[in-house]
Image (cartoon, grey):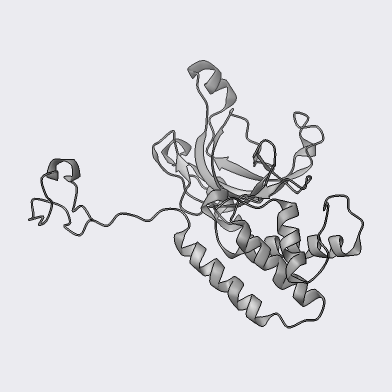
Amino acid sequence: MAQATLLEMCNTIAAQMRMPQLRSVIGNSDRNAIAIYTALKKGIERDVIRSNQWDEMVVDAEIIGNGLNYPYALPLDFDHLVNGTFWDVNNNCPAAGPLDPYQWSALINSETTVSARPMNFRFLSYNFSKIPQFPGVGRRPALEFYPLLPAQVIAIEGGSSTRFRYSYMSKWYVLDGGTFAPKEKFSSDGDTTVVDTEMMEQAGYTRMLRSVGLAFQSEQDELMAMISERRQKDGGMTRINMAGRGPVPRPNLGPDYATFRSGRRWR
């Protein structure tokens, strides 16, 4: 099913509310247009996006350290870290963290040999305006690592002090109508959303009913049912090997057993 544009979503809500159809949304000063757009935006941001860690909005990223011990700014679309995705590439093992302030203080002030430690990290909000290399950046969410090799060691040995891979949840749910690139907010009537627009329309309709003082419980229930159904289908499902491991009987494999040597083929 094709994703609806911003104008199409707003006109769907307008039709349900028995309001006139809109010719435009962005830059439209009509009271109905403003009310519908506001309801849609609130429904998307407060009811749909926050209801699940949608697979379409999870971004894989990597930080390559340069040996300087200030925090590393996270991307502009960063919302929150995805737990269990933190990987120390240098040592090919999971990284330890995020550490809380007490754990971090104990770590950096301990007497354990630095070289014996795996990569540790913490999440913080950091004011980058303090650093000459980042003019105008201001306060941003960031990650700080310990230990880091000194810059002079990197210069001699080559490479980087830190290679850290992680996944994060993006807060940019809008797709540009022309390039289909994610962006921070709607800027054109032809823009759409990363996540299923049917949920967005239902969330906006429910919010619109609520804002004008009409009954909205049945529409709220329908929205919750839609979110639950799409949450179950979001991403992929792990294939279960009912046969288990080892040289055990695998019935009903058929003639293409060699292709599916790891387990039973489900038909």
Vertical comparison of 205 with 198: above or below: below
Say which of 64 and 247 sits in front.
Answer: 247
Q: How many marks?
A: 0
Residue 35, percent from left and from top: 84, 65
Is residue 112 visible in this depiction of the protein? no
| 109 with respect to 258 (left or right) | right
Q: Which residue is depicted at the point 82% across and 68% down?
A: 19
Residue 40, located in which quarter of the rendered image?
bottom right
Q: Which residue is depicted at the point 57% across and 21% down?
A: 152
Say which of 240 and 68 sits in front.
Answer: 240
Is residue 243 visible in this depiction of the protein? yes
| 238 with respect to 227 (left or right) | left
Residue 25, percent from left and from top: 82, 53
| 105 with respect to 264 (left or right) | right
Quadrant for the C terminus in the image: bottom left
Residue 77, percent from left and from top: 67, 45
Q: Which residue is depicted at the point 19% across and 47% down?
A: 262
Vertical comparison of 236 with 87: above or below: below
Vertical comparison of 191 with 34: above or below: above
Residue 143, percent from left and from top: 61, 44
Vertical comparison of 231 with 264: above or below: below
